[in-house]
Image: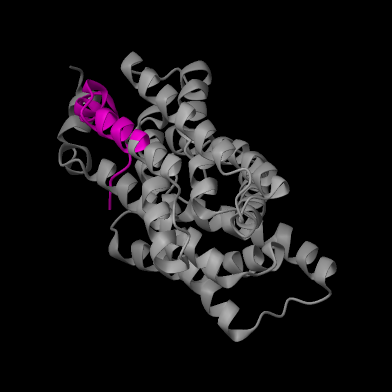
């Protein structure tokens, strides 16, 4: 084992499994954000714009505190990259984030939460395939079998509920489109963190600033106002807290955990959201949805116990301190 790999293995973040825990926290927070979006029942354009605007002072404060607590300056711009190129890189990430968020938030309000979550559970399969093909990551072949089981469960759940009260063809189409964009965003984040030595909070601040700049004028022109009722603004704030927290955890973990591994934990969103939707909104799952959820849970259990997960700390190098 060379010195750089030895340093990665001995790093406290990787040695103690903190990155995998961060991924689990992110998945839980993303699941909770789906509930807050449903509770708000708001226009997706203004809701996403406000969610981004509200996050900027919070992220700026976190970045300032992190900077004061470190002896060395935080890296907020990619070394060796021209400012123009870096700006275009961040704006590109912001554009993908904006499109995926607007479509995803809109889909939540037009479909049953469990249907939306089950469609989203296809994300790991697409992420793993793209990470292996384009990022050169390795994947345990047994995880492909488990991922295939999740695909079958997804198809069964969505088609079985086609006549349900919450079924909406446009909502399903939006959820599928959001799925594709979420895959791009997930891989974009992994690429940013594995390529550039930039602080994860600074990255998210840049991305969400781009979202605010891109979406605010569009939302304003579309609705003629940026006004949201106080209650809706409160839900947007809650979504900002849990959603931004999830993205921060995920962005930080991207440096340590390959996307082909971390994305598999997204399978847990379906059972979490399904149970929470039943409790909070009375969206009682049908029998086939319960079966699909059990399949997803079984797939995730197999992933967690796989050799790929067991040895993640020994195969991921890192050059960025965790704190």
Residue shown at 66% from the left, 65% from the top: 49
Q: Residue furthest top?
A: 141
Residue shown at 58% from the left, 78% from the top: 233
The answer to whether 128 appears left or right of 52 in the picture is: left
Instruction: Name the spot of residue 119 as percent of width and height, x first.
Output: 54, 40
Prevailing SS of the magenta stretch: helix
The answer to whether 193 appears left or right of 40 in the picture is: left
Q: Closest to the observer: 140 or 277?
A: 277
What's drawn in magenta, residue-wise? 295-323
Residue shown at 41% from the left, 44% from the top: 287
Taking 266 as reference, is 200 above or below it? below
Q: Is residue 268 visible?
A: yes
Q: Closest to the observer: 80 or 315?
A: 315
Q: Closest to the observer: 206 or 53?
A: 53
Q: Residue furthest bottom?
A: 230
Q: How is the image coloured?
A: one colour
Q: Quadrant of the N terminus?
A: top left
Instruction: Name the spot of residue 145 as percent of width and height, x first.
Output: 37, 18
Q: Is residue 73 visible?
A: no
Taking 152 as reference, is 233 above or below it? below
Instruction: Name the spot of residue 50 as percent of width and height, x first.
Output: 62, 70
- Disc count in the image? 0
Residue 302 in the magenta stretch? The answer is: yes
Residue 238 in the magenta stretch? The answer is: no
Residue shown at 41% from the left, 35% from the top: 263
Instruction: Name the spot of residue 192 as percent of width and height, x first.
Output: 50, 38
């Amino acid at each position: 084992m060379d010195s750089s790999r030895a340093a990665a293995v001995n790093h406290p973040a990787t040695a103690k499994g903190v990155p995998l825990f961060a991924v689990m926290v992110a998945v839980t927070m993303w699941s909770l954000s789906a509930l807050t979006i449903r509770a708000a029942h708001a226009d997706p354009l203004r809701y996403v714009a406000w969610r981004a605007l509200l996050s900027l002072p919070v992220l700026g404060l976190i970045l300032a505190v992190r900077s004061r607590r470190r002896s060395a300056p935080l890296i907020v711009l990619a070394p060796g990259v021209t400012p123009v190129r870096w700006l275009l890189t961040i704006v590109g990430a912001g554009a993908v984030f904006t499109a995926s968020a607007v479509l995803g938030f809109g889909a939540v309000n037009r479909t049953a939460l469990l249907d939306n979550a089950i469609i989203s559970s296809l994300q790991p399969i697409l992420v793993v395939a793209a990470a292996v093909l384009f990022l050169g990551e390795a994947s345990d072949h047994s995880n492909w079998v488990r991922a295939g089981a999740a695909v079958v469960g997804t198809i069964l759940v969505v088609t079985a509920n086609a006549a349900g009260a919450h079924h909406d063809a446009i909502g399903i189409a939006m959820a599928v489109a959001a799925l594709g964009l979420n895959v791009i965003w997930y891989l974009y984040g992994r690429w940013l963190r594995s390529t550039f030595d930039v602080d994860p909070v600074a990255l998210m601040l840049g991305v969400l600033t781009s979202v605010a700049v891109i979406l605010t004028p569009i939302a304003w022109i579309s609705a003629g106002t940026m006004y949201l009722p106080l209650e809706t603004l409160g839900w947007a704030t809650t979504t900002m807290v849990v959603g931004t927290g999830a993205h921060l955890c995920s962005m930080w973990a991207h440096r340590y955990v390959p996307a082909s591994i971390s994305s598999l934990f997204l399978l847990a969103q379906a059972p979490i959201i399904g149970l929470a939707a039943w409790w909070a909104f009375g969206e009682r799952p049908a029998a086939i949805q319960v079966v699909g959820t059990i399949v997803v849970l079984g797939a995730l259990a197999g992933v967690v116990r796989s050799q790929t997960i067991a040895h993640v700390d020994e195969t991921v190098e890192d050059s960025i301190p965790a704190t």
